[in-house]
């Protein structure tokens, strides 16, 4: 193999692609927020994340997509734990903590997105 074969195909990301990715991330944060009223929007949001992840790969927006995906999966995990333990009254606390945590992640992510900062 030559050095030419080992080089990665690094294509610069256009400003238009970044703008589209930022718009998608904004839409996903909005869908996550609306999910407190209409739960199905959360599923739509995570589908958008998975479908469009390749479009933002290698950019600072990729961290927002990962943040949003993790928010979905961990939020779902704790919602299931809260639902299972609801009958023993611990579930109520778990569900409240989960809701607060998801709200925090939406707000933190959205603010960083608006400031042009990646998520950690």
Image (cartoon, rainbow, N blue to C red):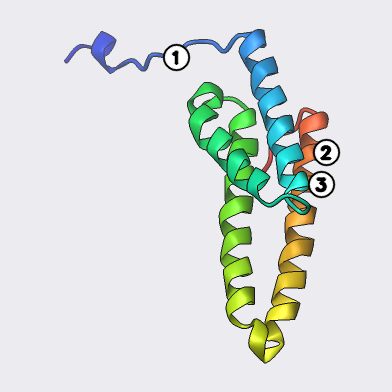
Q: Secondary structure at mark 1?
A: loop
Residue 118, position as x, y percentages in the image: 69, 35
Q: Which residue is mark 2?
A: 111
N-terminal of the two: label 3 or label 1?
1
Residue 100 sits in which quadrant? bottom right
N-terminal of the two: label 2 or label 1?
1
Between residues 85 and 104, which one lies in front from this camera angle? Answer: 85
Circle number at residue 107 = 3
Left or right of 98: which side holds 3? left
Q: Residue at coordinates 61% horizontally, 52% vertically from top-left?
A: 72
**Quadrant in which the N terminus is drawn:** top left
**The residue positioned farthest toward the left in the image shown:** 1
Q: Residue at coordinates 77% horizontally, 46% vertically from top-left?
A: 33
Circle number at residue 71 = none
Left or right of 50: which side holds 115? right
Q: Which residue is mark 1?
A: 10
- Work out whether 107 lies above or below 25: below
Alpha-carbon span between mark 3 and mark 1: 32 Å
Alpha-carbon span between mark 3 and mark 2: 6 Å
Local packing at callout 3 (Cα closer than 10 Å; few below 14, some 14-19, many 20+) is some
Alpha-carbon span between mark 2 and mark 1: 29 Å
Residue 68, position as x, y percentages in the image: 63, 44
């Amino acid at each position: 193999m030559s050095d030419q074969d080992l080089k990665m195909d690094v294509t610069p990301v256009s400003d238009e692609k970044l703008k589209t990715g930022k718009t998608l991330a904004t839409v996903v944060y909005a869908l996550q927020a609306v999910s407190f009223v209409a739960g199905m929007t959360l599923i739509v949001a995570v589908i958008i994340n998975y479908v469009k992840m390749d479009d933002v790969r290698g950019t600072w927006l990729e961290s927002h997509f990962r943040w949003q995906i993790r928010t979905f999966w961990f939020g779902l995990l704790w919602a299931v734990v809260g639902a299972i333990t609801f009958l023993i009254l611990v579930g109520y606390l778990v569900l409240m903590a989960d809701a607060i945590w998801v709200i925090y992640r939406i707000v933190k992510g959205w603010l960083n997105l608006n400031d042009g900062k990646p998520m950690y």
